[in-house]
Image (spheres, grey):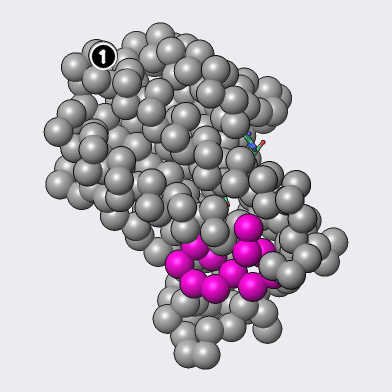
């Protein structure tokens, strides 16, 4: 879900390289189709779906379509999210609602539809979602996003406990700043502060996050559930924690 660009695209390509047959879903049809075509060009079967994950009905239909297109869904990765920038003293109701819709609420729709699908088919499954270090620490000037991403981590822990008896694992990858096309244009436009380099000497790339997601959904993580793995090159281990250069 959200596989048409950035971390989602990198994850779809890496999962294909690891032997999966990804169904790429995105709200932007052309993006999903372009990534599915990239995967097919590498010799792996793929399919594209267009849906808005903030709509429970669209999610339910999309999960059913993905089950059919894949011939049996084993893995769901939900990457959809994005930040608004406003300090708590002035954040408006619309922004607060938007960030909860775009970053948190759809995890229930996607997770529950996937879990019901796996339970109905009596098949184990693995769900991996993308949170943010903004949900672990202070998220000054983007508090709506941070609060929503903190909620994602709570959702992961609860879903892992409730669904483990059905053989369903639920984990989260927690990136710091990642050099995605979206972030590059936001940094260039000055709408998002450009972060400092991390301890490993370069900004994380979408492939760095895709690697952690691929681990979680693979059999290598067969006994791992309810966990959150930070992928930030040591950024948040710094003291004092610096958001900007
Ligand atoms: N890029 C970063 O620096 C960074 C840092 C921390 C966390 N994250 C998180 O990683 C995730 C992906 O980030 P990215 O930079 O790759 O994002 P992106 O905006 O580049 O890609 C997101 C994709 O999701 C799709 N999408 C958006 N809304 C959708 C919806 N309602 N339904 C279906 N598809 C939808 C978009 O069309 C896009 O293709 C987000 O959850 C983000 O919060 C990113």
On the image, which quarter does residue 19 sit in? top left
Residue drawn 29% across and 35% down? 126
Q: Which residues are magenta?
A: 134-144
Few, some or many residues within 10 Å of mark 1 (<14, 14–19, 20+) = few
Q: Tell me the residue that label 1 is attached to.
A: 120
Q: Secondary structure at mark 1?
A: helix
Residue drawn 26% across and 43% down? 160
Residue 112 placement (x, y as % from top left): 38, 28
Is residue 216 in the magenta section? no
Using the rendered image of the protein, determine whether residue 6 is visible from the camera's viewpoint. no
Is residue 139 in the magenta section? yes
Left or right of 104, for residue 155: left
Residue 74 placement (x, y as % from top left): 30, 26
Left or right of 84, for residue 218: left
Using the rendered image of the protein, determine whether residue 128 is visible from the camera's viewpoint. yes
Residue 232 placement (x, y as % from top left): 47, 68
Residue drawn 18% across and 29% down? 166
């Amino acid at each position: 879900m959200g596989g048409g660009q950035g971390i989602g695209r990198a994850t779809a390509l890496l999962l294909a390289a690891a032997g999966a047959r990804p169904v790429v879903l995105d709200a932007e049809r052309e993006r999903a189709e372009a990534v599915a075509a990239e995967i097919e060009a590498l010799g792996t079967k793929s399919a594209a779906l267009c849906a808005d994950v903030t709509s429970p009905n669209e999610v339910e239909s999309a999960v059913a379509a993905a089950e059919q297109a894949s011939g049996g869904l084993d893995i769901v990765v939900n990457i959809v999210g994005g930040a608004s920038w406003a300090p708590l003293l002035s954040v408006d109701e619309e922004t607060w609602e938007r960030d909860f819709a775009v970053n948190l609420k759809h995890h229930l729709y996607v997770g529950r539809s996937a879990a019901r699908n796996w339970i109905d088919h009596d098949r184990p499954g693995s769900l991996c979602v993308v949170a943010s270090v903004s949900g672990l620490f202070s998220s000054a000037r983007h508090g709506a996003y941070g609060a929503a991403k903190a909620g994602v981590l709570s959702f992961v822990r609860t879903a892992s406990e409730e669904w483990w008896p059905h053989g369903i694992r639920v984990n989260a990858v927690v990136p710091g700043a990642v050099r995605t096309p979206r972030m590059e244009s936001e940094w260039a436009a000055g709408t998002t502060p450009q972060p400092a380099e991390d301890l490993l000497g370069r900004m994380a790339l979408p492939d760095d996050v895709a690697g952690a997601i691929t681990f979680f959904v693979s059999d290598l993580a067969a006994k791992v559930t309810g966990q959150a793995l930070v992928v930030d090159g040591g950024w948040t281990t710094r003291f004092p924690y610096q958001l900007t250069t």
